[in-house]
Image (tube, rainbow, N blue to C red):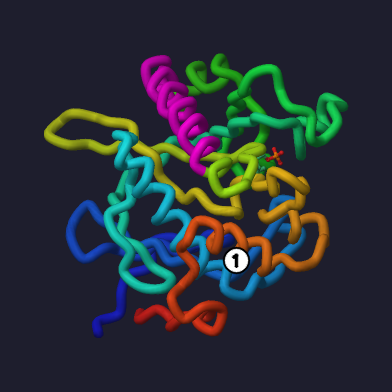
Amino acid sequence: MARRRQLYEGKAKILFEGPEPGTLVQYFKDDASSDNGTKTGVITGKGVLNNRISEYLMMRLGEIGIPTHFVRRLNMREQLIREVEIIPLEVVVRNVAAGSLSTRLGINEGTRLPRSIIEYYFKNPTLNHPLVSEEHITCFGWAGTADLDDMVALTLRINDFLSGLLLGVGITLVDFKLEFGRLWENDEMRIILADEISPDNCRLWDSKTQEKMDKDRFRRDLGKVEEGYQEVARRLGILPEAGMRDLKGPETMQ
Ligand code: TMP
């Protein structure tokens, strides 16, 4: 097979040129990092599980009319996606206080918020992804007000839908991070959901015990990191057919 052109390598994913114009191949790695790259490690099988979990959640979102970049899964670690112009924002939704919100404002972790909160962070690792307001976003041209309206409307629908879907399998969606991109079709621009939705960028707690089943197990050295990701996939009914043995998956063809 011809060697594919690598376009980007991030901490958890690699993007390759896709088979047709306007497509990319998104490869999920087992590498994990936190604290803006100062803590690194490997979570065995994470790439395989995140590929499946993100596929599953984006397909369910597609079924209720949320436009996403997901086209189809290619193999254990790769999915075909539509190429978009990424908007340089991390859109975080919070339903329950945790993480940086708890630290910044002194609100106990686990406190249910009176309503869901949307926050924006400027996607810039050099600056450690700072919290920004709509004023910063429109002033510096990262997105316009109409783009923000579209992102907020999509984000609220995604939050409602995923909160319900996950609660159905005994998981509380505490918070999560989304990224959006611009898709150009016949001179028309649409904002669609990009990146991934997985335990790497969501806080997922067991609804009864509050046990964490997400990347906080890695960030906070809680142990049983792999098990947390596996449990999310198991509850969603999407563990790879061969079970845990299969989680390393085949290496990508380059
Ligand atoms: P935070 O509490 O650290 O601000 O994180 C809020 C949510 O956003 C949490 O589910 C983890 C996710 N997140 C990312 O996916 N990437 C990031 O770089 C950060 C800071 C948070």
Q: Is residue 174 magenta?
A: no
Q: Position of residue 93 (x, y in %)?
A: 59, 31
Residue drawn at the location 63% of the way across and 37% of the way down = 175
Residue 54, relative to residue 109: is it above or below?
A: below
> Taken as a whole, is the magenta stretch helix, strand or loop?
helix
Neighbor class of circle 1 (other Cα within 10 Å; few <14, some 14-19, many 20+) is many
Residue drawn at the location 76% of the way across and 61% of the way down = 39
The magenta segment is 143-165
Which residue in the protein does label 1 denote? 230
Does ligand 1 reach within 8 Å of label 1's beta carbon? no
User: Along the horizontal axis of the image, is 234 left or right of 68?
Assistant: right
Give amino acid for label 1: Gln
Q: In terms of depth relative to the viewer, which is nearer, 33 or 88?
A: 33
Q: Quadrant for ligand 1?
A: top right
Q: Secondary structure at mark 1?
A: helix
Q: In terms of depth relative to the viewer, which is nearer, 220 or 6?
A: 220
Residue sitting at the far left = 186
Q: Position of residue 170 (x, y in %)?
A: 62, 47
